Amino acid sequence: MTRTPLSILLVEDHPTIARQVVAFLEGLGWQLDHAGTGALAIDLATREAYDLVLLDLNLPDMDGLAVCRAIKARAPRNVPVLMLTARDAFEDKARGFGDGADDYLTKPFDLRELALRCEALARRGRLHVEQELRVGPLLLRPRELRALYGGEPLALTQVGFQVLLMLCMEYPLAVSRSALVQQVWGANPPDSDALKSHIYALRKQLERASGQKMVATIPHLGYRLDLGAAADV
């Protein structure tokens, strides 16, 4: 898979963790700035246009939640924030999301998973700014509810489009069934298992356009977009 270069601000005061994260992500061709304090992080985030902020909650000068609030309020655009922390209680996560965090990764974490989450969050941020989302040969325009594969339109229902949009935003991560249901129907899901029917129809449309299976079922979890050879298109 061809990776889009990202510009990332890492806010982490632990030298070993910072070195490991910087070395791994720069090895992907990404640009990293590093801040060891909350004050420096706020200063950088409000002067530079980053694709993503990786934010440790335990900083020496101020709480990471306060840093998150300041970045969300003062950054030149709505930059996604991924919190990195050893605090794994539900209450801690709820406070983080309440203060503007877009995602949450508990330490210790796999650097490969960190990279995948960075890409998914940056994709959402770009969709907010550019109003279109490109993943391999797929191009989605949410305002028009239009999806194209290789420049050719896909005949999708509104629900099918919403499912494909969420799969694309999270690619290459899997999306749970419950998250898809919440995205499409909110608090009033249909009584029957309508999601399976829409997944089936979406699969057929994508297979017809691409000649390959593009929606993989992840047992006991949900679904994942699988571009296969099309990932580098």
Image: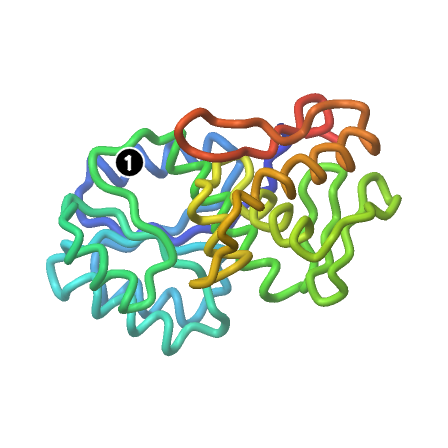
Q: Position of residue 137 (x, y in %)?
A: 76, 38
Front-most of residues 181 and 218: 181
Front-most of residues 128 and 203: 203
Q: Tell me the crowding category of disc 1: few under 14, some 14 to 19, or many 20 or more residues within 10 angstroms, Cα based.
A: few
Q: Residue at x 55, y 57 (%)?
A: 184
From what the image shows, is residue 196 above or below residue 72?
Answer: above
- 82 relative position to 223: left or right: left
Q: Residue at x 38, y 37 (%)?
A: 114
Q: Position of residue 112 (x, y in %)?
A: 40, 29
The residue that disc 1 covers is: 19
Residue type indicated by callout 1: Arg
**Going by the picture, which residue comes out furthest to the left?**
60
**Going by the picture, which residue comes out furthest to the bottom?**
73
Q: Secondary structure at mark 1?
A: helix
Front-most of residues 226 and 11: 226
Q: Residue at x 21, y 70 (%)?
A: 66
From what the image shows, is residue 107 above or below residue 213?
Answer: below
